[in-house]
Image (cartoon, rainbow, N blue to C red):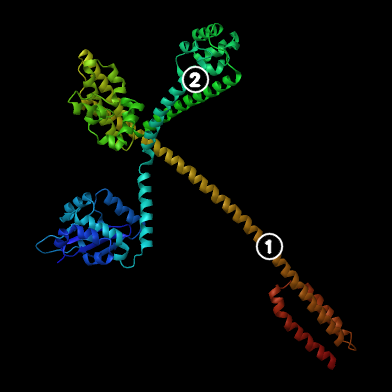
Amino acid sequence: MVLLHVLFEHAAGYALFAVKEVEEIGMLLPQVEESVLNIGKFNSVVKLAAFFPFKSAQSALENINAISEGVVHADLKLFLETNLPSGGKKKPMLGVADGKIGAALQEELGLSIQTGGVVAEIIRGVRLHFHSLVKGLTAQAASKAQLGLGHSYSRAKVKFNVNRADNMIIQSIALLDQLDKDINTFSMRVREWYGYHFPELIKIVSDNSTYCKVAKFIGNRKELSEESLEALEEITMDSAKAQAILEASRSSMGMDISPIDLINIESFSSRVVSLTAYRQELQHYLRSKMSQVAPNLAALIGEVVGARLISHAGSLTNLAKYPASTVQILGAEKALFRALKTRGNTPKYGLIFHSTFIGRAAAKNKGRISRYLANKCTIASRIDCFSEVPTSVFGDKLRDQVEERLSFYETGETPRKNLDVMKEAVVEAGVVAAEMKRKLEKKEKKKKKREKRRIEALSTAEEEEDKVDVKSEGDAETQENGEAVVKKKKKKAAADLEIKEEEEVTTNGVDEATPAKKKRKRKNEGAEPEVKEEEAEAQEPDQTEKKKRKKKKAVDE
């Protein structure tokens, strides 16, 4: 009797394999490892019990997503309930590759689950020889199924929650830090380079960006005059500094510089200025992104510090999973492990030290306020991660609480209770969320109206085109009908001409009475109303026969 079954999840479907002589195989793990590579030996150990192919690519993606999250899909449950042997004293043992899905199966179906050891080796062999073990499945089809499912699975993971993706924040804050370092290095290079020509400017202008702008504007200090004072005031935003620069340029101890060197210094200064401008744009972008992804965390601790916390944690979800004690020392891991190793004092704060709250607190209260701030940051990150409508109401309330705690440490004024503050925040957040939903619905309605108008305009344009086509077709038909009528008239005139000729031939040597009668008859026929074309055509043969009979009578007489 087979006691061990192995579940294998493939891109093509679920497969259940029966393992023969499980106890002996479990004792001989090295022999199993060797037999995995040989299909003949592996077939003697493992046999396919059942196979459930996925109906579509969407079904395969749903099943694989469920397995990756450790959830038992309805298809998998039905497959196992149908194909696993039921009854008997011993429960059937099921081997799975992932312990997470194994625990879910054990809870859902009450199975005895086995992972690792011989099961891992058997699954390795199944993965290697899967296309040979399943009838009708080729290696090419199996690889195509794996490739398609892999692409769709990765695409679904990447596209998950696109509007609130925190990957952009992680990249932005990393680039911002790198730009700060680069701008600082380049500015020092400009100071050193231009300092040979105008060394006094370094002490007058301390800001790096302003120094680069001034160096680019001045160029050769000997050409600086009173006329340039207004432009210098605009750059430095200080009339005293501009006057000091002008006076220093007249009595500077710097060496003379060639025009080609000045051109290079000005070019490099303009690059540094453009980098500084880009850094400001990037900071605005980071603020807007943080207001979308983590508005409460940004309102509580600031956009830059909040972005650094998200970047260090890896994602907003990871940050939301951290306890407050971890958030407190996030970024100070080296100091923490060094303190644990040397049995010294552990750090009180990590990245949150850059917040203004810790700087404003007294030295004895820095640890207390950092612990309180980490607690509030954890609450804010969890609200941001799991709320449907992003609002900064909770962040503002949490910030007020930290302010009250700071004043409590300084003056002893009792802060409000957390429960009361959160009740107020919930009410305000509900109002803000309702307003945002109303605006979104309004936008959606406007969008639908625009779409409807566009469709109507397209439909009317198509109708007009159809009318033009129908009109042109009708004109063509009337032209054809007119031509047909003309042809019929011509045919009728030709027939009348033939009859006339026959009459002339037959009436030679006959009395003139009959032609006179025929003329009167034709006059009378001409006076009668016109007959329809179809009736005239039908009556033509009868009239010709009557005329012929009359002609015969006249000839006989």
Which residue is at a point 60% across and 52% down the rendered structure image? 464
Q: Secondary structure at mark 1?
A: helix
Give the amino acid type for the residue marked by disc 1 in the picture: Ala
Q: Which residue ends up furthest to the left in the rendered image? A: 89
Left or right of 337, for residue 489 = right
Give the residue at mark 2. Answer: 190
Which residue is at a point 33% across and 53% down the rendered structure image? 61
Residues at badges 2 and 1 in contact (C-beta under 8 Å)? Answer: no
- Count of numbered tags: 2
Q: Which residue ends up furthest to the bottom in the rendered image? A: 556
Task: Estimate how packed mark 2 is, as few (under 14), some (14 to 19) or many (20 or more) residues with alpha carbons within 10 Å.
Answer: some
Image: 475 above or below 209: below
Q: Position of residue 398 (x, y in %)?
A: 27, 25
Q: Nearer the viewer, residue 483 or 167?
A: 167
Which residue is at a point 24% across and 18% down the rendered structure image? 406
Q: Position of residue 509 (x, y in %)?
A: 90, 89
Residue 288 visible in the current orientation? no
Give the residue at mark 1. Answer: 476
Q: Which quadrant of the structure image shows residue 6?
A: bottom left
Mark closest to the chain's N terminus, 2 or 1: 2
Q: Quarter holding the N terminus?
A: bottom left
Residue 327 visible in the current orientation? yes
